[in-house]
Amino acid sequence: MTDNAALTLETLLRIASALERIAPPARKAADLTAADAFVWHPAGSELAPVAKVNRVELSLLRGVDRVRDILAENTERFARDLPANNVLLWGARGMGKSSLVKSVHADTNKRLAGQALPLKLIEIHREDIESLPVLMGLLRQDRHRVIVFCDDLSFDGQDTSYKSLKAALDGGVEGRPDNVVFYATSNRRHLLPRDMMENERSTAINPGEAVEEKVSLSDRFGLWLGFHKCSQDEYLAMIEGYTSHFKLDIAPEDLRREALEWATTRGSRSGRTAWQYIQDLAGRLGKRLES
């Protein structure tokens, strides 16, 4: 080998070595056998297993019977390898939207144990939505059925990451994998603030088209499940359900008086407010909240 050839070969080897060092790491196949729930970390294309999901028993979620049944039916169909819709749970804060998703997931696995593969739940954070197509690609070849879940999803200002969500849910050449559905919660029915939509109307050349592009995102969800502020009776039913389930010893008249005072001081009645009161009550009674 001539000196020039040897020098050329050495240079090529150095270039190849440098390219290997700067190349992104090989994408690992998703391993969904480690747990039933995971959190998506896009930086390393990693699915972190969740040993214990923060959830409540489905029977303890009161005042949401209709949406509970619809979500449970859609989830069971999906777990049984039947067609199912993406779901947007929207409406009043603190009314159990995210709790319902987690509880229905666990309840479905419990009811279908031995009849189907365990249904998996993967949480993706709002700020990681742009990586959703990457996650979909990892899940496409897996044999498990997967709910990809985003809590408190919304878009503001000049945020364009909603386009990644639109493509992953319904568009693109490949489309959404057959083994994946997307569940999201939001306080906004169209995922966009009203002032943002009004601004689009006032500044766009074609106002209708500008707003329509953004509003069409919510159309990717086949099911819209609305959550509304609860009545006093529903709020008290939540309190009584928790008290009975956790065996908290308090006189009914005291429970009613304290629960209503708690809601008044916070200016709202909701499932979250009810749970916060129960935590306070259990603490005062020296009782741990264990099922």
Image (spheres, rainbow, N blue to C red):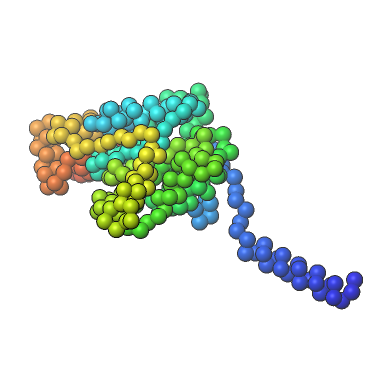
Quarter of the image with the C terminus in it: top left
Residue at the far front: name it: 205
Q: Position of residue 4 (x, y in %)?
A: 85, 75
Q: Position of residue 243 (x, y in %)?
A: 21, 33
208 to the left or right of 42: left
From this view, report whether residue 197 is shown above or below residue 290.
Answer: below
From this view, report whether residue 265 is shown above or below residue 159.
Answer: above
Which picture quadrant has residue 248? top left
Residue at 19% in and 38% down? 229
Residue at 41% in and 42% down? 149
Residue at 37% in and 56% down? 159
Q: How many marks?
A: 0
Q: Position of residue 274 (x, y in %)?
A: 21, 39
Residue at the far right: name it: 1
Residue 272 visible to an observer of this rendering: no
Residue at the far bottom: name it: 3
Which picture quadrant has residue 104? top left
Residue 163 visible to an observer of this rendering: yes
Residue at 33% in and 42% down? 185
267 to the left or right of 279: left
